[in-house]
Amino acid sequence: MGYTYFFTGFPGFIATSLIKQMIRNRFSIDHLYLLVLPHLIDKASEEIDKLTNEGNISREKLTIVPGDITKPHLNIERELNTHLQHHVTHIFHLAAVYDLAVPENIAYDVNVNGTKHMNEWVLTLSKPERYIYFSTAYVSGTREGRIFETELEMNQSFKNHYERTKYEAEKLVRGIISKVPTTIIRPGIVKGDSLSGETIKFDGPYFILNFFDKLKFFPVIPYLGTGKAEGNFVPLDYVLKAAIYLGHAPIGIGKTYHLIDPNPYTMKEVYRMLMEEFLGRKPIGMLPLSFAKWLLSIPLLRKWLRVEKEALDYFTCMAKYDCTQTKNDLQQLGITCPDFQETISSMVQFYEQHKNDTDKQLIID
């Protein structure tokens, strides 16, 4: 008898990748129920076809559940909901708005209200064995210095609505941790697969590549600010392996994990390494970050560069994320985060091949 899973965030990249990894690992899966917004059902069906075409799982074991986390009871049809309440054992909650520039009302509705409704729904299940909630390391907001996995409410402020609403959502999840076996996953900034470079969206460190791509004909490209902050970029495959293990192993119950780079490079080093790999050049000089932010406050310019102004805040984020608990609990399986420098080649190659794919570029307002 296998586990019965309920996923939110499908057909998003990380949710889809988690499911794919679990199927390839031949997990004991009784059934996979995938909550999908009505307007994404066709896309979800296409993703399911891809999953089943690999031959490791039958189509009968995957069910699309039309619904919406922003609605009470997730807007799931009553009869199906009753069935889920009696069968679901593992819940992976990934649905969220991840855009750094998201308006406050949208971020609050999806990230906070959505998680509130998820928690209420999880508490109706008759046999939940694990609730795995995907938060973010950046619930730390504007805090600086060492930040521990056990910390959350530290009177911090926030750089954007995304951070604040994910913080509020994690507080809600922690509020039911004594009632449901729960594991909280806090990834850093997730980049593509460390080997293939594959990703679905060019955000995070890819904004730097967008910047270089537009300015590649300039004789000189400067550093952006001093770049002393740590760049916490983690490859997708590390996040998948860690989250799947920690979300099932008894050791993960009641814990919060920083899935971050334990040996991060500074943003200056990241910037230089990406330029060397992509353009074969090194940065010269330095553009004050305040001036760069002013430039990106001009809509036409940031749209042309394909860079969100909010991304620059992470060039000055002087947080140092402690991941001792994560390293200790993953040690037995030998799951470790690859060195960022060793993943740059595949990352840049994938970007070069797909940089003009409109579905991979964020719409910059």
Image (cartoon, rainbow, N blue to C red):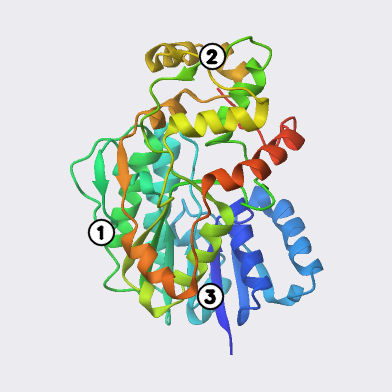
Task: Give me the disc on residue 84.
Answer: 3
Q: Which residue is mark 2?
A: 299
Q: Position of residue 91 (x, y in %)?
A: 48, 69
Q: Residue furthest bottom?
A: 1
Q: Quadrant of the N terminus?
A: bottom right
> Relative to residue 317, is residue 26 depicted above or below?
below
Tell me which amino acid carries mark 3.
Leu
Mark 2 vs mark 3, foreground winner is: 2
Q: Is residue 169 left or right of residue 58?
A: left
Which of 338/148 is in front?
338
**Are discs 2 and 3 less than 8 Å apart at CB?**
no
**Residue 119 placement (x, y as % from top left):** 38, 63
Q: Nearer the viewer, mark 1 or mark 3?
A: 1
For the question of whether residue 7 can be seen, the reply is: yes
Amino acid identity at mark 1: Thr
Tell me residue 98's x, y (percent): 49, 42
Upstream in sequence: badge 2 or badge 3: 3
Rendered image: mark on residue 150: 1
Give the alpha-carbon distance from disc 1 to disc 2, as whole Å: 39 Å
Callout 3: SS = helix
Tell me the element at label 2. Answer: helix
